[in-house]
Image (spheres, grey):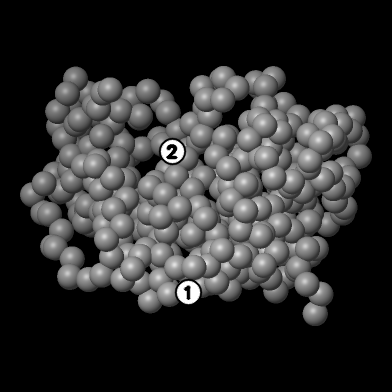
Amino acid sequence: MTIRWRSATVDRLGAAWAGSVELHATLTSGPETGTQVKALAHPDLVGTPRPGDRVLLNVSALARGLGTGGYALVVALPDRLPADPEPGPGHLVKARYTPLQTMVLGADDQESAHHGLLAEADDLAGTPVVVADLHSALPAVVAGVRAAAPGARVAYVMTDGGALPAAFSRAVAGLREAGWIAACITTGQAFGGDLETATVHTGLLAARLVTGADVVVVAQGPGNLGTGSRWGFSGVAAGEALNAAAVLGGRPVAALRVSEADARPRHRGVSHHSLTAVGRVALAPVDVPVPDTPGAFADGVREQARGLCTDRHRYVEVPAAGLDEALATSPVRLSTMGRGVDQDRASFVAAAAAGRHAATLLPRT
């Protein structure tokens, strides 16, 4: 277990979005002294950096070229620590026993105004719950929902398989600002959502009962973990989230991870992540939507999806007409593993098809 620590001086600030700010800093320690790096700070955790500040950075993932968005991460402003927060309710500790563990008020916390609503709750009353492997599917799923039900209220439940701070996600910030999602609910060790909960189960219940969501989308935060092995990837939790939705009386919908451009054969067509999470981990019956897109590649995807549905799951073919237009309206950039719609259209259309199917499950008014 290793952390690469570096000190640096802030040169200038860059882009900012809800809960995050980029900065450019010059390293003042280590063999790279004098090198400028791009770093990311979460002001709610470490305070707001200014040009000239000395910052303590974690550069471990940056040095290895891993998926942190190309950032070093600000651990502290040691010469200008933020003031103590005002005393308040809440005792859920997230990112537990790490140096940046943070205490939050959970919607399911005994001190929360929502505790009475959630204490004995265990019924989603058929609410559609779309579960995706990758965070990048979120805006595409919501685009599909809006294509069929423009007025549907959508909540996002963020699990802790990827980034823990919700503020890391520009997509969440942009979707919230545009009104495409009504709330982000952070579960498990993830934190920083509009609502906090201890588990995926209470996250789903809070989405329905507290935020009044018509459709819930569940996915890990940005930066999924994979090892190239059948079981060694953070998206395994997608199968558990589908089970949670079923246990609570929701209507679980699996958004398949699909790619026509990934260089790795195991992710081409329906990814082995989906084949494992949906085919092996999801024990309750779930809907498996696929778009009716023409062509040999799409035919292969449908064949793989049917293979997932030979036992307990339900195969659903979804009209793809209009989904490209729906995706084009996204208020945030569509990108998966560095590829946009032009490079990997199938990925986004598959996610949008799951959202469109979920919308068709809503009561007709």
Quadrant in the picture for the N terminus = top left
Sequence order check, earlier mark of 1 and 2: 2
Q: Which residue occupies 35% across, 65% down?
A: 109
* Residue 139 in view of the camera: no
Q: Position of residue 86 (x, y in %)?
A: 17, 70
Q: Which residue occupies 49% across, 68% down?
A: 120
> Which residue is outermost to the bottom?
365
Question: What's the residue type where badge 2 is placed?
Answer: Gly
Q: Which mark is residue 69?
A: 2
Horizontally, is 300 left or right of 355 in the view? right
Q: Are marks 1 and 2 in contact (CB under 8 Å)?
A: no
- Mark-to-mark CA distance, 1 and 2: 38 Å
Q: Residues within 10 Å of mark 1 (few under 14, many from 20)?
A: some
Q: Which residue occupies 55% across, 39% down?
A: 237
Residue behind mark 1: 117
- Indicate the quadrant where residue 25 lies: top left
Horizontally, is 277 left or right of 42 in the view? right
